[in-house]
Image (cartoon, helix red, strand yellow):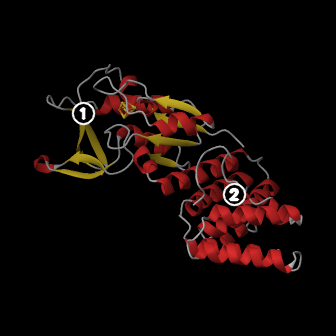
Amino acid sequence: MNRPRIGISACLLGKKVRHNGEDKRVDWLVEELGKFVTWVPLCPEVQMGLGVPRKTMRLSGKPQTPQLLVRGTDENLTSLALETSKRMMAPDLDLDSFIFKKDSPSCGLERVKIYGKNDSPSRSAVGIFASAVKTKYPTIPLIEEGRLTDLKQRELYVVRLFAFTELKRIPLKVAALQKFHQDYKLLLMAHAPDQYRMLGNLAANSSRKSVRDLLLNYQTDFLKSINRAPTRKQWFNVLQHMMGYFKKTIPSGERQQLMSSMEEYRRGVIPLVAVLTLFKYLAQRHSVAYLLTQKLFQPYPKNLLLVQY
Ligand code: SF4
C-alpha cells in the first residue's frame, strides 16, 4: 500500500512548540498511524520567528479577512502570518493530506474563534495557516485532530486517506483510472450509492477531457463521495449485491451461511468485518475474481488497528 505524506501541526506529534512550551501529542497518531505514513510536521508560529514560549494570539475582524493579534498588546501579526504561510507552502511538499490542531488561530481548520465588533466572539473562522494549506491543496483530505477522537470519523478518515493516496499515484492514463474505479466500486457503492455510477461515467471519459482534467475532476468527486459515512442499510445493500456473485457458484449450505451472517449484521448482532471476512473466504475458495480485487475488503493497511465500521 502507498505510504501517504501527511502534513501535520507539529505540536500534535509531541514537538514542544506551543506558546507555553508544551505539546499536544496525540498518541494514536504517533504510535499507530505513524507506522504507515510519512509525517511532514510544520509549526507556522515557530516559522514566523515568534519563539517558544511566546504570547498567545487571537483572530479579530471578519471571518473572510481575519487579523492575527497578540493578546494583551493587540500587535497585528497578520502580514507576517500570511507571508510565512505563503513561504511554507511555496515548495511542493507533495502532501496527500493534512491534520490540523483544532481551535488554533493559525492551524484551526474550522469553527475557530474570531472576535468581531464589541469584542464578541463567534466560532466562524479558519486559521491563517490552515487557509493557506487549503488554497495550495484544494483536493486533499483535510481534518482536525479533534474529529479523530471519534472512532467512526477516524476510520472514515483513514479509508479516505489511503484511497486518495492511491488515486494520486495512478499513472496518467484513462485505463489506470478505470481500473482504480473498478477496484473501489463496491466501497463507493457503500459510501455514496447515488454517486458511484456518475463516477463510473466520469472514469469512462465519454466527454473526452484531457487525462489531467479528467483525473482532477474524478479526484474531487471521489473525495466528496468517499467522505460520506455509509449507513448499515447501505452496507447491507452492498452485501446483497455481492451475494449475486455467488448465486450459482456455491453450495446451498455456504449460501445459507452467508445469508444468515448478512441478516445478523443487519440486526446489529455481528460487525461488518465478520461478514466481509466470510465473503472474502468464499470468494477465494470459489475464485470469484471480481470480488477479490475489491478494496472494500482491505481499504487500509492490515495492521492499522481499526475495526471496520
Ligand atoms: S501554530 Fe500550529 S503547530 Fe504551532 S503550536 Fe500552534 S497549533 Fe501547534
Question: Mark 1 and mark 2: span between their CA atoms?
Answer: 42 Å
Q: Is residue 244 visible?
A: no
> Which mark is on residue 57?
1
Q: Position of residue 254 (x, y in %)?
A: 81, 74
Q: Is residue 290 visible?
A: yes
Tell me which image quadrant ligand 1 sits in: top left
Quarter where residue 174 is shown? bottom right
Q: Tell me which amino acid carries mark 2.
A: Leu
As displayed, is residue 1 above or below residue 70?
below
Residue found 66% across the figure and 49% down from its top: 300
Q: Position of residue 127 (x, y in %)?
A: 35, 42
Q: Is residue 143 left or right of residue 260?
A: left
| Label 1: which secondary element | strand
As displayed, is residue 106 above or below residue 305?
above
Residue count near mark 2 (Cα–Cα under 10 Å), binned few <14, some 14–19, many ≥20: many
> Which mark is on residue 214?
2
Residue found 56% across the figure and 38% down from its top: 32
Residue count near mark 1 (Cα–Cα under 10 Å), binned few <14, some 14–19, many ≥20: many
As displayed, is residue 296 above or below residue 95?
below
Residue found 69% across the figure and 60% down from its top: 296
First in residue order: circle 1 vs circle 2: 1
Residue found 47% across the figure and 45% down from its top: 134
As displayed, is residue 243 above or below residue 19?
below
Q: Nearer the viewer, residue 153 or 181?
A: 153
Q: Position of residue 11 (x, y in %)?
A: 41, 30
